[in-house]
Image (spheres, coloured by chain):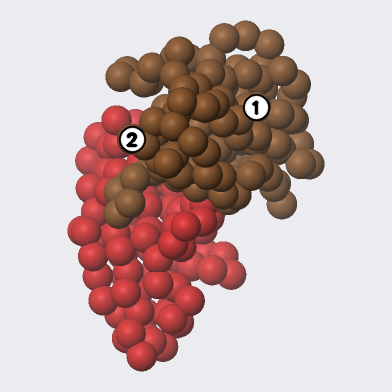
Amino acid sequence: GAVVSQHPSRVICKSGTSVKIECRSLDFQATTMFWYRQFPKKSLMLMATSNEGSKATYEQGVEKDKFLINHASLTLSTLTVTSAHPEDSSFYICSARDPLAYGYTFGSGTRLTVV
Amino acid sequence: DAKTTQPPSMDCAEGRAANLPCNHSTISGNEYVYWYRQIHSQGPQYIIHGLKNNETNEMASLIITEDRKSSTLILPHATLRDTAVYYCIVGDNFNKFYFGSGTKLNVKP
């Protein structure tokens, strides 16, 4: 079945630095990918839609300058958390849809800790 | 925004069937019902989906009411490894997925 790979699985960074998270569709092409964040004991919150070859669209309340999204190829989307602060610490998850399947496939997530 | 309502938690004895309900009274005619589960610190895992007919696969069964306003996910013989948060989501193949609060299923020995 469709596989979405996310890297890294865990990252710790210092406050003020930027962190890049990669999301790859391994066996299918995805013109659209999605980024979520999840706080402890909470549900997944959709942050943005990553569109191959064009600008990402952000959900209301999500700072686009804080969370930079690049979807440079049909198999790779990246999320960069810029000038990270402790409140950005969260579990970030990406997803993509295999055109030959129903629903979406999710990555295994990235645990970001900002110290 | 999420269009589904689920109980926050349920308990189930190991080996017994787990029946997880979901209300989606505003579902549109072309929207499917999807079920995913999330085991702690992992990404959501697809379980099953359906449009209006009942569906069964190797993991679970999905029962959708005739008016499509609610559904039930059935895990026929729950194991400890089925302990997870289960999410019911409605959408077509082009919609974004918005997650509701889900149901935390606790399978107990």
| In-front residue for pair B74/A34 | A34
Residue A36 shows up from this direction? no
Q: Given this view, does label 2 or label 1 mark the residue nearer the observer?
A: 2
Residue A108, compared with residue B31, is above or below; it is below
User: In the shown orientation, is residue A32 left or right of residue B82?
Assistant: right
Closer to the N terminus: mark 2 or mark 1? 1
| In-front residue for pair A107/B103 | A107
> Residue B92, percent across and down?
47, 32
Q: Which mark is residue A87?
A: 2
Residue A53 shows up from this direction? yes
> Chain A's shade in the image?
brown
> Residue A52, percent across and down?
66, 17
Q: Chain of mark 1?
A: A
Q: Chain of mark 2?
A: A
* C-alpha gap between disc 2 and disc 1: 23 Å
Callout 1, which amino acid?
Ser
> Chain B's shade in the image?
red
